[in-house]
Amino acid sequence: MTEPTSGSGVQPTEPDFLIVGKILRPHGVRGEMKVDVRTQYPEWLAEQDELYLGMDQCDPASATKFEVVSIRSHREHLLIMLEGINNREEAALHRDKYVLIRLDQAMPLEEGEYYTYQLIGMAVYTTTGEYLGDVMDIMETGANDVYVLKGSPRGEILIPDTDEVIEEVDLDERKVTINPIPGLLDD
C-alpha cells in the first residue's frame, strides 16, 4: 500500500473569510453587480449587513468591507448593491473579485457538512485501506461535488461526494473513507 506523501494529516489553516460569490459584471447603471453564487444558502446572504470584496480569502489585507444596500435574486444569480459603489464604472472595478464573509459570520453547518477548506489536503482511503491520494480540489458540478485526488500511483482520481460513496469524513484524523462502488476505480 502506498502511503500519503503530500499534505495528509496536516490541519488546514483556517481562512479569515469564506467565499460566498464572485462578481461577474455590473448590472445597470446605478452600481449594482451581478454575482455568481458560491454558497448553498444564498437566501442567508440577504440577511447580512456587511460583505467584503477581495481577491484572496486568506489575506485580510486584500478584503474591503462594504455595507449592504440591497441583495436580490436574479435568475440563477444575485444582484448586490453596496454602499459607496454608485455607478456602472465603480462597479466594473470590482469585476472578478470574490464576495466574502468573515468566518464568524458564516451560517452554522449541520452535522455531516464541511467547508471546502477543511477537506483540502485530507487523505482518502477505501474501506479496505487502500490509499487513493489527497483531496487537492473540489469541483462543483451541480448534481454533487467531486473530490479531485492526487498523490497515489493511480494518478488523478475523481470521487463523487455522494452518500453512496463517502463512508466517513474524520476531521480530527484528516481522513476520508470511501466505498469504491463498481466502476469508480477501474484499473
Image: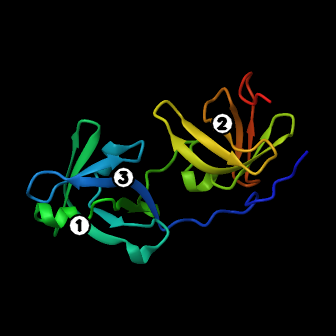
State the residue lying farthest toward the right: 1
Name the N-terminal-most of marks 3 and 2: 3
Residue identified by numbered label 2? 159
**Label 3 CA crowd tier, 10 Å (few <14, some 14–19, many 20+):** many
The location of residue 180, given as percent across then percent down, is 75, 29
User: Is disc 1 in contact with disc 2, using a CB cutoff of under 8 Å?
Assistant: no
User: Is disc 3 in contact with disc 2, using a CB cutoff of under 8 Å?
Assistant: no
Q: Residue at x 43, y 74 (%)?
A: 60
Q: Is residue 54 above or below residue 144?
A: below
Q: Residue at x 57, y 56 (%)?
A: 117
Q: Which element carries disc 3, helix, strand or loop?
A: strand
The location of residue 100, given as percent across then percent down, is 38, 61
What separation in Å lies between label 1 and label 3 (alpha carbons)? 16 Å
Q: Residue at x 51, y 47 (%)?
A: 109
Name the N-terminal-most of marks 1 and 2: 1
- Indicate the amino acid at tag 2: Ile
What separation in Å lies between label 1 and label 2 (alpha carbons)? 37 Å
Q: Which numbered dot is residue 185?
A: none
**For discs 3 and 2, the disc positioned in front in the rendered view:** 2
- Indicate the amino acid at tag 3: Gly
- Residue 66 falls left or right of residue 102: left
Q: Residue at x 37, y 71 (%)?
A: 63
What separation in Å lies between label 3 and label 2 (alpha carbons)? 24 Å
Residue identified by numbered label 3? 21
**For discs 1 and 3, the disc positioned in front in the rendered view:** 1
Query: Which of these two is toward me, 16 or 34?
Result: 34
Name the N-terminal-most of marks 1 and 3: 3
Q: Which numbered dot is residue 93?
A: 1
Residue 162 makes an appearance in the image:
yes
The location of residue 22, given as percent across then percent down, is 35, 54
- Indicate the amino acid at tag 1: Leu
